[in-house]
Amino acid sequence: MISNLIQRDAFLKPDLDCELSPDRVGLRGRYYLVYLCTLIFLAQIPGCTPGEPKGGIRLERASGRLLYQGKPLPFHQILLLPVEGPAAIGLANEDGNFAMGTHQIEDGAVSGTHRAAIVYVGDPELDPSQHGPVSGYVPPPPALIRIPKKYGDAKISGVIVEIPIGGSDQIIIDLE
């Protein structure tokens, strides 16, 4: 019996030494190092740290008025394509007033220079079922003010919009 205990004790002792062996500590240390590096890496990705704006970018308020030859341009969609960052979209109401949104309606746009495209989309308050089948495409009623087709393409429209740092509620987009 005592010899069995001595053999069992001798058998367990190497396991205890193995737990503290440099190889085991090194492996545990490597896992800890990989875990720590992963946390540091994830903290550097935009949007992964607390307090960062959604998507890791700062959005500025961007609203104003859309005009054509000095008159309000109602029910036109505005697409802003920045040099760097996500696009923003807005819809001019019946008075030509708009507010831009990037991730959500009217949450703003990135600051900087933007190329713009403007297209007529119709009054969003109209019920499409009154104008045609609900399941199919229903074109909007004719625009009250027709603008040249070039404004529908940001590459050729020639419309440049500046969103300042800090944002603005006084952006005027006047098409000629």
Image (spheres, rainbow, N blue to C red):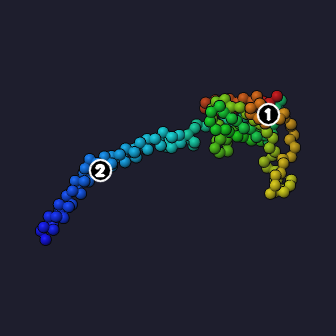
Q: Quadrant of the N terminus?
A: bottom left
| Numbered disc in front, either 1 or 2 | 2
Does residue 42 appear left or right of residue 84 in this picture?
A: left
Task: Give the percent coordinates (x, y) of residue 105.
Answer: 67, 44
Question: Which residue lies at the image location 33% right of the left edge and 48% below the top edge?
Answer: 27
Q: Nearer the viewer, residue 42 or 167?
A: 42
* Amino acid type, label 2: Arg
What residue does disc 2 label?
Answer: 24
Q: Is residue 86 above or below residue 22?
A: above
Q: Nearer the viewer, residue 61 or 136?
A: 136
Find the residue positioned furthest to the bottom: 1
What residue does disc 1 label?
Answer: 151
Is there any visible trace of residue 108 in the rendered image?
no
Does residue 15 appear left or right of residue 45 in this picture?
A: left
Task: Give the percent coordinates (x, y) of residue 75.
Answer: 79, 42
- Residues packed near mark 2 inside 10 Å, few (<14), some (14 to 19) or many (20 plus): few
Does residue 135 appear left or right of residue 101 in this picture?
A: right
Numbered badge on residue 42: none
Q: Is residue 66 above or below residue 15?
A: above
Task: Give the percent coordinates (x, y) of residue 97.
Answer: 75, 38
